[in-house]
Amino acid sequence: MSQWKRRLAAFFFVVLLLAGGGVWWYFAHHAKTPEYAVQKITESLEKRDADTFFQYVDVDAVLDHSYEAFMEGAVTAEAPMNDEAKAAVESFASVVKAPLLKSFHDAIQTFVSTGAWPQGTGGETEALLDPSVAMEKAGLAGTSLAGVDRIEYHDEDATAIAMVRVRPAESDEDFTLRVKLAPADDGHYRVVEVENYRDYIVMLAKARRAKVEAYLQETASLMAQHETAMREAEAQRAEILSAGALGNDATRQALKALMEDTILPDWQARKAELEAIEPPPAAQPLHRLRLHICNLRIAYAEGYAAWMTDKKAATIRDAETKLKQAKTLEMEEMFLTKRMGEGQ
């Protein structure tokens, strides 16, 4: 063999040796590092690969470690509680733990596979077991991954902490989660816990309260302005009725004009102004209630004005039913507004 051929063979031998060593290092060392696990988790989210995600995230362990903090944020952080109420919450938490954790597990699998969290029932009443409500209260829905700052090693127990920055939709600032990884039986690292999840829930609770307070303040002046207009309209209505009989055509025309020119436009304007406001998730039940009251008041004004012309008993009965429903819901709206304000 000529010298140059021997050199060429030696070169390729070295290349193959280095390549083989690189493959060995990759599978024997790098693939069993926290960095590799974090990389695979990130890739699984990008590729919608649920199998890989669950391979490197022990979802059940994470959920079990986080459950107490979640319940505190979802229930007890809503408002101050006495000992009796806290005991009731703890009892409730133990009863719903299994179905709630399953709901979370299924929701996470849906999100990893599709990129979207499962939707709720769409009903007026929220329930903790509703997937969309649970995801929102857990601080998952609307939260995006901002980056991994660094990974810290704990040699004493071979664990690692990944500093994962997330961006919650309900907060104007990023939050750094301390994501704990531990080696599995096969040596590969898996996420097993979020150490500061309780702090995350507390931060979200404060951010939610701030946004609810801003919503209440923004809508307070709006509601007060329209309530003043309605009191003035009711005074005009009383004056019209005191000046003439309801059976009088002039009186009925005056009442119809008051409804069509003053009361109806005011409720329509109130509804439009409310619809222009984007409420935070925690204030959505109150916001929907207010819009429903507007619809009932608008229907009442239209029906009452129509009765001034057609004089049909069915017309006024339907209008009065709408008014009765609106007044009932207005009491509930006052109670809910007060309760939300006290929770700030």
Image (cartoon, rainbow, N blue to C red):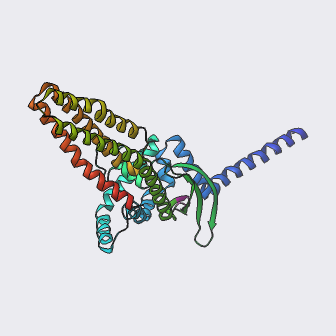
Q: How many marks?
A: 0
In this rendering, position of residue 311 left or right of residue 49:
left
In the rendering, at what x and y percent does residue 176 appear? 57, 58
Res. 139 visible in picture: no
68 on left or right of 246: right
Q: Main secondary structure of the magenta part?
A: loop
Judge whether residue 48 is colored magenta. no
Which quarter of the figure is the N terminus placed in?
top right
Query: Which residue occupies the extreme top position in the image?
Result: 310
Front residue of this view, candidates 304 and 140: 304
Q: Quadrant of residue 263?
A: top left
Residue furthest to the left: 313
Q: Is residue 205 left or right of residue 100?
A: right
Q: Which residues are magenta?
A: 186-190
Q: Is residue 30 visible?
A: yes
Task: Decide: is 171 above or below 226.
Answer: below
User: Please, which residue is most extreme toward the front here?
Assistant: 243
Q: Residue at x 56, y 48 (%)?
A: 42
For the residue pair 5 and 61, the one nearer the viewer reads as 61
Percent of width and height locating residue 216: 41, 51
Q: Is residue 214 above or below residue 301?
A: below
Quadrant of the rendering where the C terminus is positioned = bottom left
| Residue 187 among magenta residues | yes
Q: Name the spot of residue 300 as percent of width and height, x first.
A: 22, 36
Say which of 195 and 75 sits in front. 75
Query: Residue 54: horizontal and vertical position, in percent?
Result: 47, 52
